[in-house]
Image (tube, coloured by chain):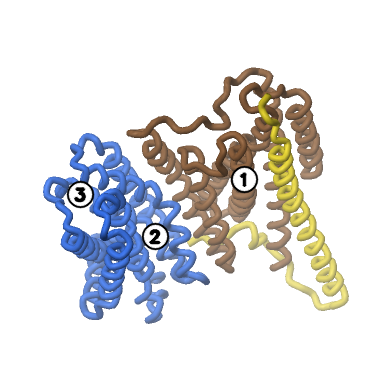
Chain colours: A yellow, B blue, C brown
Amino acid sequence: MIADNWTFVAAAYGLTAIVLLGYWRRLAKKERELEALSRRNAERRRAEPSSRPPLDESPLQQHPRP
Amino acid sequence: MSYARRALAVAWKDLAVERRSKETLNALVFFSLLLLFVFQFTLGGDRERLAAVLPGVLWLGFVLSALLALGRTFLVEREHDCWEGLLLAPGDKSAIYLGKLVGNLALMLVVEALVLGLFVVFFDIDLGRAMPGLLAVVLLGTLGLAAVGTLFAAMTANVRARELLFPVLLLPVQVPVLLATVKATEGLLLGEPLGAIAHWVKLLVAADVIYVVVSVLTFDVVLEG
Amino acid sequence: MVRTLGWLTVAGLLAGLVMAFGVAPREVTQGNVQRIMYVHVPLILASYLAFGVLALASIVYLIRRDAVADRVAHASGEVGVMFVGLGIATGSIWGKPTWGTWWTWDARLTSVAILFVMYLGYLLLRGTIDDPERAARYCAVLGIVAALDIPLVHFSVYWWRTLHQPPSLMKPGGFTGSSAILWPLLVNLLAFVLLYAYFVARRIRLLCAEAEAAA
């Protein structure tokens, strides 16, 4: 009977799970940090009564063409 | 100024600078001598082992020299604050690429000829029959290295950790060229007919065409800023 | 929408696990260690998808200079490198008991290893350039060069390993495929493609949010 090598199976699946979960948690953590940051920015902006010029077409979606 | 004229002007300028200062050339020659000595220490005694690893060792020498040469190709522009000059150059900037490519090719071929000559002399290798094929393979391989190398050198010229990033980016991409040149050189040195290594030569030609065309088309993008 | 994708992915992965361990048979020549294939192959194939998307997104970016295309390339590169790295690791773990060695320089392994290093370099380039517009441009160029290099890598490595050489050792994939093995493989492949899509979608959303916060 051929050996089953379940330890290797566990190692492969385990490593995959750990790395994928790790990446998922990293995404979640960054999202939370960004959320907190933008909330703080919004609060600060509300506290300041100074008006900001309205943004026209978002400069973020289009990089300057040469 | 016509496109070709601009390209040649860049090449001529680079070669003239090199001829006067000889900085890169000296570094490469010195480096090649060092390689030669190290190979002699490790392999010199055993002729059979030497013959077996010679193609790989030879191209290792060529590649390491290429990394040195290509890594420095935009050094002059960077150090003397001429980078903006490149960015503001009128017309098709790919002329600059071709000029740099020709300059790099010339430099690399000179060094390779020197390294090859040293190897032949110090390791007593008979190149006779292999010569024309070897010449073609060396030319094609060097063009492949220089084509992508010049593009990547421009890309990494102004980034952090440039000296580390440049070889890290270049070498994996160049694996097909390295494989093809080493196997073709091996075949030639074993006296095989050109037909036996024809597929390697075809791969090198294909690679060179792809690399040069892509680089010419994208160099403008790299020099936008 | 990202959340639905997430739940679909979880369902797919669970189904995949059930198929891999409950439905798939015990392989005749290798034993149960062959079940590693049900993560290894999907990871590799999904990474190919990731790199293909990266190449396309890079071309789109250079033509249209649309920041979203750049973010697609960025996210796809991250997930692709992660998947291919895991693919290599699981392949190595599979290889040790079946081949007796952690690594061998056969054609497929060598090609995949080169792929891994190439796209790792892509991520490194992104990490080194601070200006997002320049990073987008340079990475698009690198993405295109890398993609065009893939057939060259494939042929050079394949010729290196097969010409004037005896055929390579039996690969883990070298067993007679049957439908009993095919279905679990397909389910897992679908699950990992969903996982790729989910990760990329979430990463792009994060990149857009980061860009807005920096403004």
Q: Which mark is residue B151?
A: 2
Q: Which residue lies at the image location 71% right of the left edge and 62% below the top edge?
A: C210
Disc 1 with disc 2 on a shared chain:
no
Q: Is A58 drawn above or below residue B25 in the view shown?
A: above
How far is disc 3 from disc 1 in space, using C-alphas?
39 Å
Report crowding for label 2: few under 14, some 14 to 19, many 20 or more residues within 10 A (C-alpha). Answer: many
Q: Which residue lies at the image location 63% right of the left edge and 42% below the top edge?
A: C93
Label 1, on which residue?
Answer: C89
Disc 3 with disc 1 on a shared chain:
no
Q: Is B136 drawn above or below residue B27 in the view shown?
A: above
Q: Which mark is residue B134?
A: 3
Q: Which mark is residue B204?
A: none
CB within 8 Å, label 3 to label 2: no
Does residue B98 appear in the picture of this structure? no
Q: Chain of mark 1?
A: C
Kind of residue sitting beneath label 3: Leu
Kind of residue sitting beneath label 2: Leu
Left or right for C173, reference B112: right
Q: Is B85 drawn above or below residue B177 in the view shown?
A: below
Q: Indicate the secondary structure of the residue bearing disc 3.
A: helix
In the rendered image, residue C82, in percent from the top left (x then y), is placed at 63, 49
Q: Indicate the secondary structure of the residue bearing disc 1.
A: helix
In the rendered image, residue C196, in percent from the top left (x then y), is placed at 68, 42
Q: Chain of mark 2?
A: B
Q: Which residue lies at the image location 77% right of the left edge and 44% below the top edge?
A: C2
| Earlier-in-chain disc, 3 versus 2 | 3
Q: Indicate the secondary structure of the residue bearing disc 2.
A: helix
- Front position among marks 1 and 2: 1
Does residue C168 appear in the picture of this structure? yes
Quadrant position of the N terminus of chain B in the picture: bottom left
The one nearer the camera, C50 or B133, is B133
